[in-house]
Image (cartoon, rainbow, N blue to C red):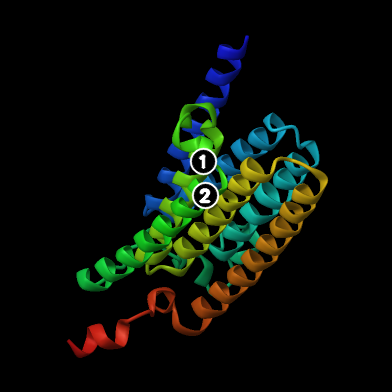
Amino acid sequence: MIASSTLLEGGLALCLCVVALACLFDRHLLRASSLFILFALLMTLAWWWLGAPWLALAELLLGAVLTGASFFYALRVFPSDVDSSGYGRRVSYYDNLQGIWHHGVARALLALAWCLMMGGAIRYVMPVMAYSPTEHPLVLAAIFIAATAMGAFALHRHLLRRLLAFNILGSGVFLLLAGMAGTVDGAQALVSVGLLIAWLGSLLGALLIRHLLLLGGESALGHDGSAKEKAQ
């Protein structure tokens, strides 16, 4: 029974990692947004598995429904977003932005340093992880998801892809917090507030992306470093 339970938890952790990777590195924005909703549904199952049904409900509403809808709102996929001028139909669902390689290397090194510091902190707080890591598959998945999302946030230039990485990073950190502190009332309250703040941040990001699309077109969504690239 214990082996079967560990196997199910390991399968859930593996699915979380695979879907997070697909969402973070898929250049098709509409598909990546759909994958985020699938990731949020898997996070709902993870919270339920950890014995936190209220967090599962919060993840379902704030993550899968509201945050997922925010991404689609930013991409102007709803019928009401197609105005008479046809502007809504000209939004590309594919990220064609290419960054400068040394910028990507510098950002990747910063993300790696952050991940090493996080790993050191986890080893100090949970030394048992160093001797029996397979007994905590969801904690391992949380570490992998947070590290990968941090790297994706540092590497991507497209604002919507950064917003996706921000949300997946938050989910990894929340899952890691629950793995270390347990699903006691205080930890659940903290994670619930974090989920609410993450949704509000995603909604604000979606509104800003829509505004940038209106003012500067799709090129404005990858403005980071564009002035230097033009000068070179």
Which residue corresponds to mark 2? 124
Q: Residue at x 57, y 25 (%)?
A: 9
Can the viewer see residue 156 in this picture? Answer: no
Query: Is 153 or 221 nearer to us in this picture?
Result: 153
Q: Amino acid at mark 2?
A: Tyr
Q: Residue at x 52, y 49 (%)?
A: 124
- Residue 10: mark: none
Name the side, left or right, on which 151 lies relative to 2.
Answer: left
Quadrant of the image containing the C terminus: bottom left
Residue lying furthest bottom in this view? 231
Q: Residues within 10 Å of mark 1 (few under 14, many from 20)?
A: few
Name the side, left or right, on which 8 lies relative to 134.
Answer: right
Q: Amino acid at mark 1?
A: Pro
Which residue corresponds to mark 1? 127
User: Percent x, y for residue 195?
Assistant: 70, 56
Can the viewer see residue 78 in this picture? Answer: yes
Residue 212 higher or lower than 56, as above or below: below
